[in-house]
Amino acid sequence: MLLNEIRSTKFKSVVQTITYLPHFLSWVIFGGLFITLLNSDGIVNYMLGRLHLIDSPLQFLADPSYFWGVAIGTGLLKDIGWGAILYLAAMAGVDQSLHEAASIDGAGRFKRMLHITIPGILPTLMVLIIFAVSGMLNNNFTQIYVLQNSLNLPASQVIDTYVYQTGLLNFQFSSATAIGLMKSVFALLLLFGANTLSKKITKSGLF
């Protein structure tokens, strides 16, 4: 929403380009880059040390307590620009005459965002939230697999990597199939539950 309010088209284009670029990199490249940056002798530990924020290098990918912070942070950096495309497209479809009328009535940018933009993109927002809820059990396998190692395994083991290890590494195909099937069943239940709740609260849903 803040990006949509930027008046300078050149600055807006630069920000969009920079935030979109990571999406087109594979997790092997993007994850490998962050593994290098977060190493004990990487640039992140070097900068923290130079700023006297740490006394010894932090083991970001060796300490399980740091794993999900790294996973969430890298996931946001990689996909935040691509996800913004959907919201920018939805905001472009909001009737501009509403903004003009509100501006004449004395509404500032924040009030127009709150009372016009958000209600205008609510259907798109709810669809994306429903998809996000139904996909809660779907971790990004490639991301987790790239960042995972034997030291952070207690925190980084998720359903997808467990199914991979059970089925393809341990050759327990029946167990892996059963786990994957149950995950799909729970995802379907989450989808219907989120859609029903959305329709009751906002009168907007996926179906």
Image (spheres, grey):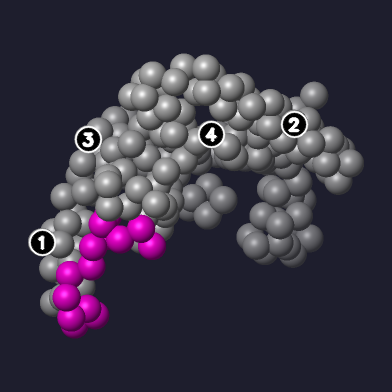
x, y percent for residue 166: 42, 27
CA separation in Å, label 3 and label 4: 21 Å
- The kind of secondary structure element at disc 2 is helix
Q: Residue furthest left?
A: 41
Q: In the drawing, what numbered circle is on residue 29? A: 3
Residue at 21 percent of width and 48 percent of height? 35
Q: Earlier in the sequence, mark 4 or mark 1?
A: 1
Please report the bounds of the magenta region as a residue range: 52-65
Whether residue 71 sits left or right of residue 40 in the image: it is right
What residue did someone put label 4 on?
138
Contact flag, marks 3 and 1 (Cβ < 8 Å) = no
Q: Quadrant of residue 133?
A: top right
Q: Is there any visible trace of residue 113 in the rendered image?
A: yes
Relative to the observer, which residue lies in front, 156 or 96? 156
Q: Earlier in the sequence, mark 3 or mark 1?
A: 3
Q: Earlier in the sequence, mark 2 or mark 4?
A: 4
Mark 4 closeness class: few <14, some 14–19, many ≥20 residues within 10 Å: some
- The kind of secondary structure element at disc 1 is loop
Q: Amino acid at mark 1?
A: Asp
> Does the magenta stretch mainly form a helix, a strand or a loop?
loop
CA separation in Å, label 3 and label 1: 19 Å
Q: Amino acid at mark 4?
A: Asn
The correct choice, above or below, for 171 with respect to 156 in the image is above
- The kind of secondary structure element at disc 3 is helix
What residue did someone put label 2 on?
189
Whether residue 184 sits left or right of residue 161 in the image: it is right
Contact flag, marks 2 and 3 (Cβ < 8 Å) = no
CA separation in Å, label 4 and label 1: 33 Å
Contact flag, marks 3 and 4 (Cβ < 8 Å) = no
Residue at 16 percent of width and 50 percent of height? 36
What residue did someone put label 1 on?
41
Whether residue 156 sits left or right of residue 39 in the image: it is right
